[in-house]
């Protein structure tokens, strides 16, 4: 049976999501959200320390299950290229295919210059993902599947390659949606370049 706190938290998230959609991030205030929920601002702050944190929880909840499933792929058995490919495809689906995912990323980048939204997303999303990918790459290096180097830097390079053909077009509104075929093509090219740069001698090549 759900606790009263959990039920209250879910009600806040539902009302806040509706408020953000109606008024936008800038127009929605904690005061407005608390009034719609029914209660004081102090109660709202007991659950969420800021509007930015509240927005992140709403945005992340839409992809949380797929985020966890995607990163669990890094623990799966399989050859390195296959694991990197399935991970990359899952990651790009999280970032580009849920409804409003691209618009949310645009908003996060825009708001980062005037609020802590970008920092919160970086610490709670990007850094979590980066830590898990870095551990995976470190183990691949230990096993001789990749050349020895800084796994944290290698992880950043892989992220950059995965996003390279889509990010700018989507953020700059040249493209409003991403098809599955585009994701697969972007990942195939990214993994090929990554393995060309980081693969150990004797690793099989991936089809371009």
Image: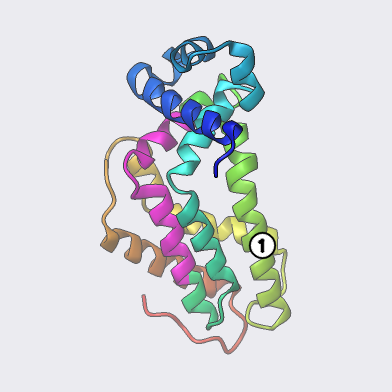
Q: Secondary structure at mark 1?
A: helix
Instruction: Left or right? Give the position of 104 relative to 52.
Output: left
Which stretch did the figure color magenta? 85-108
Residue 193 to residue 200: above or below: above
Magenta stretch: includes residue 89:
yes
Front-most of residues 165 and 18 = 18
Q: Is 189 above or below relative to 36?
A: below
Q: Is residue 45 above or below residue 183?
A: above
Image quarter of residue 115:
top right
In this rendering, would 37 be left or right of 40?
left
Who is closer to the viewer here, 200 or 45?
A: 45
Pinpoint residue 13: horizontal percent, then vertical percent. Answer: 48, 30
- Magenta region, main secondary structure: helix
- Give how far across and how far down residue 148 sits, in percent: 72, 74
Residue drawn at x 46%, y 83% as measured from the top left: 205
Q: 207 or 7, which is in the foreground?
A: 7
Q: Residue at x 43, y 37 (%)?
A: 105
Q: Do we see residue 197 in this rendering?
A: yes
Horizontal and vertical percent position of residue 123: 65, 41
Q: Is residue 164 visible?
A: no
- Is 171 covered by the magenta stretch? no
Tally of marks = 1
Q: Residue at x 54, y 12 (%)?
A: 39
At a point 29% along the width and 51% down the height, the residue shown is: 178
Q: Of residues 25 and 149, which is closer to you in this image?
A: 25
Identify the image quadrant of the N terminus: top right
Residue that badge 1 annotates = 134
């Amino acid at each position: 049976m759900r606790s009263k706190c959990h039920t209250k938290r879910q009600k806040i998230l539902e009302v806040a999501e509706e408020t953000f959609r109606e008024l936008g991030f800038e127009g929605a205030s904690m005061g407005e959200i608390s009034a719609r929920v029914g209660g004081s601002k102090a109660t709202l702050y007991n659950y969420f320390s800021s509007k930015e944190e509240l927005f992140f929880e709403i945005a992340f909840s839409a992809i949380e299950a797929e985020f966890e499933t995607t990163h669990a792929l890094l623990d799966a058995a399989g050859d390195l290229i296959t694991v990197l490919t399935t991970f990359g495809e899952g990651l790009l689906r999280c970032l580009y295919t849920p409804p409003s995912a691209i618009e949310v990323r645009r908003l996060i980048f825009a708001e980062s210059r005037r609020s802590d939204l970008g920092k919160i997303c970086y610490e709670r999303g990007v850094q979590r993902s980066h830590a898990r990918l870095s551990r995976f790459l470190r183990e691949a290096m230990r096993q001789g599947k990749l050349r020895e180097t800084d796994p944290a830097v290698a992880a950043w390079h892989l992220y950059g390659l995965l996003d390279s053909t889509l990010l700018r077009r989507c953020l700059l509104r040249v493209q409003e949606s991403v098809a599955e075929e585009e994701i697969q093509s972007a990942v195939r090219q990214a993994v090929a370049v990554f393995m060309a740069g980081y693969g150990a001698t004797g690793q099989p090549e991936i089809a371009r």
